[in-house]
Image: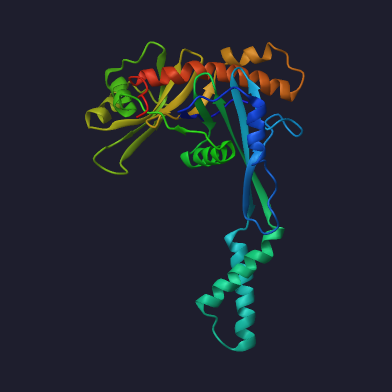
Amino acid sequence: MWFRNLIPYRLRDQVAYDPETADQRLAALAFTPCGALEPSRSGFVPPLGPGAPLVHAAAGSLLFCLQEETKLLPAAVIREAMDERIGAVEAAEHRKVRKRERDRIRDEVVTDLMPRAFSRHKRTWGYLDTEAGYLVVDAGSEKQAEHFVEQLREAWGDLTLSPPETEMGPGTIMTRWLAQQQLPGDLELGEEAVLEDPNAEGCEVRVKRQDLTSEEMRAHIDAGKRVRRLAVTYSERLSAVIDTDLSLRRLKFHDVIREQAGDRDPESQAEQLDADFSLMTLELRTLIPRLMEWFGGEKAPS
């Protein structure tokens, strides 16, 4: 239960640390499998497994798990079935099938195939830190995170949140770090970065496993490129790639943190998840405010 990505949202209103009420709210959007003709469906499942509550509470945070089911109907399969039906019509009636009829046949094919389609399941995890006032989502893309937020809002009813903003632009500050090779005392440069030319859309440089203090990197900065993503290590406790949108990618908790969960000697998978979640949320409760401080502090809501 260690997040690999981190997309934060600032809660604009206080949320009570009340797992029972939260569980009741999520019950309205509990996951149920797709119906025979449904292409997709999503809903919340118990983080600790079947039979457990829809909300797991620990260390002042409320953990949720959104499950999505998507029916898989490959385009090639649909096309093959369509061609077969269209061919049969044209052969029997000696005429060409026009677009409107082709569209109708396609709809019929999809309807016939849907009940037999395989399903793909994907889970997205997130938690509300009621003490720090953040929603944190483990998502590899903004689209995935926004879907989680939409579902949580629908279930919650009165959840007001938005992406945080900082006083200074993260891209400007990270470019300065790289140009001056001076970072905050609790940060060290990693070996990965994405730089882009603000005057040329799509012009970017991606580097991995490279010395970011090299002359080559300095030349990119001198040529006017600006940092969009930068790999760093925080206090020798975790590493991540910071994005200008304040998300963290490839988040990795170091052994100094993970070993603390092992020290608790959990007896079940649920106990292990609880231990991991408690340690992770406490660590991120320190990191996220510090992330905002690196870029001049978080802006007050307007």
Q: Quadrant of residue 192?
A: top left
Residue drawn at the location 47% of the way across and 18% of the way down: 287
- Spot the residue most to the bottom: 94
Between residues 138 and 252, which one lies in front from this camera angle? 138
Residue drawn at the location 55% of the way across and 81% of the way down: 97
Instruction: Point out residue 50 in the picture as x, y percentages from the top left corner.
Output: 75, 34
The vertical placement of 137 against 84, above or below, is above
Q: Quadrant of residue 278?
A: top right
Q: Is residue 189 left or right of residue 20?
A: left
Instruction: Point out residue 6 in the picture as x, y percentages from the top left corner.
Output: 50, 29
Q: Is residue 229 left or right of residue 256?
A: left
Q: Is residue 68 visible?
A: no
Instruction: Point out residue 55 in the picture as x, y percentages from the top left corner.
Output: 66, 29
The vertical placement of 293 against 44, above or below, is above
Figure disc tally? 0
Residue drawn at the location 51% of the way across and 76% of the way down: 99
The vertical placement of 231 against 150, above or below, is above
Q: Is residue 214 left or right of residue 278?
A: left
Q: Quadrant of the C terminus?
A: top left
Between residues 143 and 73, which one lies in front from this camera angle? 143
Q: Quadrant of residue 260?
A: top right
